[in-house]
Amino acid sequence: MFYIYCPYCGEHREEEEFHPKGQAHIERPKEPEACSDEEWGNYLFFRDNPRGVHHEMWVHAVGCRKFFNMTRHTVSYEILETYKMGEQPSITADSQAKPREAAAVSQQEGVRA
Amino acid sequence: MQRYSGFGLVKHALSHHENWERQWRNPTPKKQYDVIIVGGGGHGLATAYYLAKEFGVKNVAVIEKGWLGGGNTARNTTIVRSNYLWDESAVLYEHAMKLWEGLSQDLNYNVMFSQRGVLNLGHTLQDMRDIQRRVNANRLNGIDGEVLDAKGVQALVPIMDCSKNARYPVMGASWQPRAGVARHDAVAWGYARGADAHGVDILQQTEVTGFKIRDGQIYGVHTNRGDIEAKTVGCVAAGNSSVLAKMGGFNLPLESHPLQALVSEPIKPILDTVVMSNQVHGYISQSDKGDLVIGAGIDGYNGYGQRGSYPTVEHTLQAIVEMFPIFSRVRMNRQWGGIVDTCPDACPIISKTPVKGLYFNCGWGTGGFKATPGSGHVFAASLAKGEMHPIAEPFSMFRFHSGALIDEHGAAGVAH
Ligand SMILES: Cc1cc2nc3c(=O)[nH]c(=O)nc-3n(C[C@H](O)[C@H](O)[C@H](O)COP(=O)(O)OP(=O)(O)OC[C@H]3O[C@@H](n4cnc5c(N)ncnc54)[C@H](O)[C@@H]3O)c2cc1C
Ligand SMILES: [Zn+2]
């Protein structure tokens, strides 16, 4: 169970109050009409989906109902930070080459695939 | 290969079953193969089997980082059906269904395919309209299906609460009698044994860590046991497909999510069919051992950790108890998660990629077990010929650029 800090409410709340909304920082093309099919398709459907540090959007669905961003590790599931819309992450894949929990988890039996 | 038979069983009983031949070898990797399959799940092993058996490509390796079937293949709830809405997917899943029907014989391995029928419940008027539409489409494609009303459902499953007092009353269902369940690990093992018998090298505990690409053409893979060369590489890595695609220098339209399942303590036979509900989101069957096999929904966040969250388990059990009040005191024995590769249109990707000679078979998400034989068969045909098999053709990854999506959210909605 995640215990998530909403940067707008300024409080930790339980996972069930929130919904994940996919990869963060995807910008809608300024001029959709000018996009090639490939650019438009990439914008709509193609995702980074990393095994490691991921920046993603969440919504505090049954709280303040605001969207915000989260940096989370997709193997250890550790939440590294949450931050407001429009802000940039302070933790990235490069700055976090190997978070300790992730290393521990991937060494466990059966946690390989 | 030592063939299995009733006679063999008796014969081996005399030596206390201590002299059975190993089901497959554990070879050292060769320097070079004609085809490398990355991923030793059901789909990868089936691909290798059909490559060697049907398409005459015998110099093949299956590279698996863990153990055979340790991915989603042996983590799923084993539901097999083919009642998908659109022609493209109906043809694909029905191709698999026909192969399922002869699979134990073909492999000389009991995959325990049991055609006990699958019910997809409808709880709203719109559900029932969609069910009618889907069943009509199925019949036009030669796939068996019936629309049942609540009485018909009750007659098939007496223990289900089909009364008007249920919180989400059952209004009816689609019913596919030929659908059912199979034993998932036997599928991986049966294909592995068959492929090995045709000369395929199965390399377990071998992880692909990169691709060897020159002038846009693949010519091998890097692994933790050294480099292995091949001009044709097929990746069948389910939840890890995006990671492999990155190694090839491109993205896929996939997200990896945890999907959970649980089994109860064994109880006496009580449920002889498979019940799925999209609306309250739960699905259930009973295994031959007697445990109830229950599938949950995905966790909405991306994850590679092979475990999901408790709220998801709780929602699933709420749905099951709502449908089957009689199960409210059954205790759950085990619970686990697999990493499913969900695709925006709920259909797989069986495709060439921007790298020549590199193919991907992925995006099966929550529902690829049922397709294992068909997926392996058409993928093998495509790898052998260098051209996509007509059944695979519509499932190109480039449909997300052309816009030719195949929206199966209706038929694939429940995570089964
Ligand atoms: C809980 C759950 C319930 C499900 N229920 C159903 C159901 O009822 N019916 C249904 O039809 N489907 C169901 N599914 C979906 C189904 O299990 C999958 O779609 C299907 O099994 C995928 O098979 P696969 O062979 O492609 O993948 P997998 O079995 O996951 O095999 C992929 C393999 O690739 C290996 N691999 C990954 N990366 C590398 C690498 N770099 N190097 C080497 N090897 C690598 C992995 O170790 C893994 O063994 C369910 C899934 C889950 C998780
Ligand atoms: Zn909030």
Image: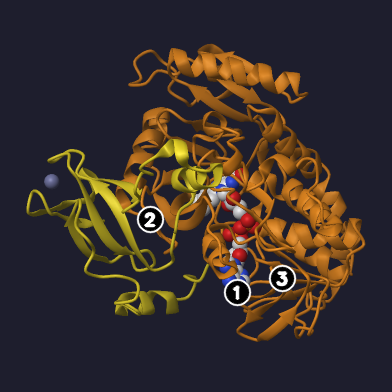
Chain colours: A yellow, B orange
Q: Nearer the viewer, residue B93 or B230?
A: B230
Q: Quadrant of residue B198?
A: bottom right
Instruction: Identify which residue is drawn at 65% across, 31% down.
Output: B117
- Label 3 SS: strand
Q: Nearer the viewer, residue A100 or B165?
A: A100
Give the labeled residue for mark 2. Answer: B308
In this view, the mark in front (3 or 1) = 3
Badge 3 crowding class, 10 Å Cα cut-off, few under 14, some 14 to 19, many 20 or more, is: many
Q: Amino acid at mark 1?
A: Lys
Q: Is residue B108 visible?
A: no
From the top left corner, tell me how far across and down residue B114 is, in percent: 70, 41
Residue B330 versus residue B308 in the image, above or below? above
In this view, the mark in front (3 or 2) = 3
In the rendered structure, which disc, 3 or 1, sits on the residue that comes first in sequence? 1
Q: Quadrant of residue B148?
A: top right
**Residue behind label 1 places its C-beta within 8 angstroms of ligand 1:** yes
Q: Kindly report the distance in space between the C-alpha atoms of the residues bearing marks 3 and 1.
A: 20 Å
- Count how many numbered circles sit on residues in the image: 3
Dot label at residue B65? 1
